[in-house]
Image (cartoon, rainbow, N blue to C red):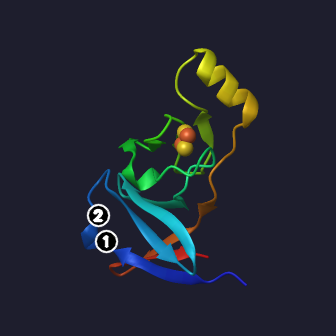
Amino acid sequence: MAKYVAAGKTGEFKDGSKKKVSLEGQEIMLAKVGNDYYAVGNRCPHLKGDLSAGKLEGAIITCPRHGSQFDIRDGRNVRWLKGAGLLAAVGKALKSPRDLASYRVKVEGDTISVEI
Ligand code: FES
């Protein structure tokens, strides 16, 4: 049964910041975009790149390994691998695009909680 687990404090985040948290054995990236907080799986579904080490622009996180991009508002894949060369074509053929897990977030007082 799903439950909310405390994941951080609002004071830790400014707009555009993110961090990796481990909750109930799951690695999650928690981020603030504007006034909202979002939680998605932290490992890229391509080859497990650490998304918390990637670049967050607006709501789009770019994987630091091969440039796949995801919308952290819903986990949707918006680009699968970077580039259009032969290597990218082979990579795309070998592993098809996948979305990130997306988690509900709530804020009570200064505590940010994620539904696990
Ligand atoms: S591991 Fe993320 S794009 Fe390859």
Q: Ligand 1 near label 1 (Cβ, under 8 Å)?
A: no
Camera-side residue of 18 and 10: 18
Q: Quadrant of the N terminus?
A: bottom right
Quadrant of ligand 1: it is: top right
Read off the residue under disc 2. Answer: 13
Camera-side residue of 55 and 88: 88
Residue 68 percent location from the top left of the image: 54, 36
Residue 54 percent location from the top left of the image: 40, 46
Q: Are marks 2 and 1 in contact (CB under 8 Å)?
A: yes
Which residue shows up at 32% across the image and 50% down it? Answer: 16
Which residue shows up at 69% across the image and 29% down it? Answer: 92
Residue type at numbered disc 2: Phe
Q: Quadrant of the C terminus?
A: bottom right
Element type at mark 2:
loop
Q: Is residue 103 left or right of residue 54?
A: right
Is 75 placed above or below 14 here?
A: above
Element type at mark 1:
helix
- Mark-to-mark CA distance, 2 and 1: 6 Å
Read off the residue under disc 1. Answer: 10
